[in-house]
Image: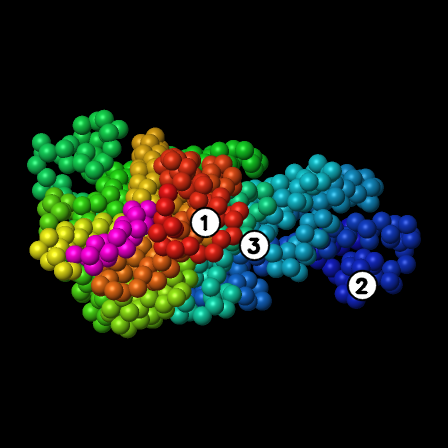
Amino acid sequence: MLHELLLALLGYTGDLIIHNSNSNSDDRPFKLASDISFIQPSDRDLIERIITLGFYYRELDRFATESRNLSWIRSAKNESPLELSSSKNPASVYRRAIANGVVEMLSVYRSAVLHVEQKLLAETVPILATVTQGLNKFFVLLPPLYELILEIERDNIRGGQLLNLLHKRCHCGVPELQTCIQRLLWHGHQVMYNQLASWMVYGILQDQHGEFFIRRQEDTDVEHGSSLPDIPEKLARLSTDDTSLTDWHLGFHISLDMLPEYIHMRVAESILFAGKAIRVLRNPSPSFRREDALYHQQMPRGSQKLQGLMGRFSFQKEPLMDAKLMGEELLPQTEADKIEAMLLDLKESSEFHKRSFESAVDSIRAIAASHLWQLVVVRADLNGHLKALKDYFLLAKGDFFQCFLEESRQLMRLPPRQSTAEADLMVPFQLAALKTISEEDKYYLRVSLRMPSFGFTVKSSQVDIPKPKDYADGNSSSALSSASSEMSLDGWDGIALEYSVDWPLELFFTQEVLSKYRRVFQYLLRLKRTQMELEKSWASVMHQDHTDFANRRNDRVNRPVSQQRRQRFRPMWRVREHMAFLIRNLQFYIQVDVIESQWNVLQAHIQDSHDFTELVAFHQEYLSALISQSFLDIGSVSRILDGIMKLCLQFCWKIENQENGSNTSELEHITEEFNKKSNSLYTILRSSRLAGSQRAPFLRRFLLRLNFNSFFEATARGVLNVVRPRPALPALNQQ
């Protein structure tokens, strides 16, 4: 009877103690055979209570055996990780780790049973009292653990979800049970730390069964049923085939399902960034390696410092700092050892300390961000490329674009041809480059001109404005309709620039960033083109006026007619000056108050920061400030500005094409529309929502320049408060 009892405590039933397979939740799974009559009811009840531990032991041992079974390794050769994770008994390294903890606890239980057996055989003591006294502590351990494995198997809990469950169960009022579950959690954390070490030291995602909270994007797309052709389309948006860039932009993300609740989202994002940065540093582009080596082989020793400082920063104080960086690995082994040591300290700790974990992650992230900063900023010459983008996309090279617009002026008077528009523009573009850009400008070769709107119906503007109708007639004087939004210009406002970016700068200059630059460029080019047309029209009209004056002196018969025409168009010159005044001030505000001031702020941030993620944030703030302070994100203002530029161009073409005796009704209409839009623009900009906010800190200067003699304010007040019929043309332009 004694040995039957001891064997039952280890999960083995027999003739005396049987397994009640039909037992309900209230019945005991192990019980004494019903035909045993020599045991008292009280002893029977106590024995059945004790041998329940044997049932719990057997179930826990079954769970541990199944979870530690390595037969899935052979099946993994023929099945994908997704098939393994969706099978009936999915493999799980986290369950295997928990099973190791369960085995540790069961070995303690077996030792206690063995000790009870030795005591009973060595001494004459009461059997049931000795067994109860020796195994009593396991009544608070085995039942909760049994419920735990039932929940794990029933809900198929794996990975981070399993850590989450154990972390919640640690909060209990039984010290022995709390210690036991903490030990299980420690085993689970060992797997997590191994995965963190693989990810943050070597940049390798070691997660065969999809249990880590860092996941590959492709795996997620497959699980959610998205079509496989979508993935190549995403990757095609990148301008390089390098794996590191693919991984950086689209490769990995945080799986919220597997993220333990006690790990903050900010910490998980730091882990994600650190691993991606390590992948980039350990897998540089082959072309970058070749260029790097060739650059230093060909550079004379005495000119290394000079070449390193060109286009870079004043804070490079050590003479050969850049040369030393070029000779070292992108991620020195000492830094990798430091990261590994931090994770090893966390792994060896008996308990999980949230503050220590977050501090270590922040330190690792800082190391990765610092070395990524060295790669992108110092070795890849980030500041030189930023300056190039400012020169070409923000029109800092004003002489180049002035020459380009002058060379292409006659071409842009005609509607663009869909088949050859881009090629037609390349001639004046290259001619302007020959005249204004020196051979030392190595960044010009990265700039290319594009007409991205072709292949569709070409519209005149691409940024938050109503789309005008298309005209096939190249004569601008015949295309004007009564609606001021319609114009004969077809699509030249769609001119865009592209900038070729090499590895690793594509980590910084993403397609989203370059699209923002293109948006600002198109706006600034339209503005500069409008300003140039106003100046050219004035020169053209003055030339015609001087010619008429010379002819008038020799032609006494037609002199009164010439004087009358000159008198009739004199108010038009005043209107042109009003247009030029507004456009010039707007151009000065954007180029000086917005672009230059924000550029200086960005440069100060770049010099003070040695963190790649901070640089990305500063650059995003820089672009957002350019867009917001230029009013491109305010639909009403951008539509008014676009309408004003259209009216200015229409006015220039009309006034240049006027013939003797032609009526001025169209010019009157343009003038009236311009006055309305300019007054509306001033009214909106001087509102407290804009002028009183911090989104445009230099807006008050712009308004002061516009309204230096209170003309705009008086005109706007009159438009708002007085309803008047449309006056004659000269009266419209009196100050």
Residue appearing at x 76%, y 65% in the figure: 21
Q: Quadrant of residue 695?
A: top left
Q: Which residue is mark 3?
A: 257
Q: How many marks?
A: 3
Q: Which residue is mark 2?
A: 23
Mark nearest the camera among 2 and 3 is 3
The boundaries of the magenta stretch are 559-579
- The percent position of residue 652, horizontal first and vertical second, equals 26, 56
For the C terminus, the quadrant is top left
Q: Amino acid at mark 1?
A: Ser
Residue 448 in sight: no
Front residue of 360/239: it is 239
* Label 2: which secondary element: loop
- CA distance for labels 2 and 1: 85 Å
Q: Is residue 234 left or right of residue 124?
A: left
- CA distance for labels 2 and 3: 36 Å
Residue appearing at x 43%, y 52% in the figure: 676
